[in-house]
Image (cartoon, rainbow, N blue to C red):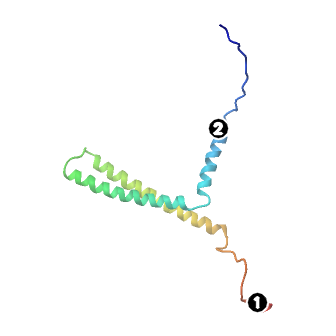
Amino acid sequence: MTSKKTDCSIVASVFNEEESVMMFYKFINSISSFSKVPLQLGIFTGLIFSAISLILIVFSLVMWILEKTIPGYTTLIIFMSAFAGIQLFVTGLIGQYISYVFDEVKGRPPYIVDEVYGGENEKNN
């Protein structure tokens, strides 16, 4: 038994790597351009990570005193966890500071007055 065969041409769109990279940058810019929340989230995450690292440091030291650890494990855990939390916290602080400087450099007024009630406008009328 034979079946009929036909040709069908399909035009596939070409993958544009630059376009996908630009979409990623637009996504990141849309998250971080109008809000300081990602910076504050970095500070908060750094504080939480530092608190967890303190608990881990105490646990690792207790296990080291009881001699139930692998050699070098305690030192590695203490340094890695402490420095990661501190680094994330400080990076968030620096980012927050830069965002405040950026807002100040824009030169926008802190508020815009729509109407004035009382004061000199009423004296002139």
**Residue found at the far left of this picture:** 66
Tell me the quadrant of the picture where the C terminus can be found.
bottom right
- The residue at 64%/50% (across/down) is 26
- The numbered mark at residue 17 is 2
Check the image and report above or below for 101 versus 81.
below
Question: Picture quarter containing residue 103?
Answer: bottom right
User: As rendered, which of 121 and 72 lies closer to the eye?
Assistant: 121
- The residue at 54%/61% (across/down) is 37
- The residue at 32%/48% (across/down) is 76
Check the image and report above or below for 15 versus 103.
above
> Label 1 crowding class (10 Å Cα cut-off): few <14, some 14-19, many 20+?
few
Q: Secondary structure at mark 2?
A: helix
Q: Disc 2 residue type?
A: Glu
Q: CA distance from mark 1 to mark 2?
A: 63 Å
Check the image and report above or below for 16 versus 114.
above
**Residue found at the far front of this picture:** 1
Q: Nearer the viewer, mark 1 or mark 2?
A: 1
Is residue 107 rendered to the left or right of residue 43? right
Is residue 125 rendered to the left or right of residue 43? right
- The residue at 30%/55% (across/down) is 57
The percent position of residue 78, horizontal first and vertical second, equals 32, 53
> Label 2 crowding class (10 Å Cα cut-off): few <14, some 14-19, many 20+?
few
Question: Picture quarter containing residue 23?
Answer: top right
Residue tagged 1: 122
Tell me the quadrant of the picture where the N terminus can be found.
top right
User: As rendered, which of 98 and 5 lies closer to the eye?
Assistant: 5
Check the image and report above or below for 35 versus 27.
below
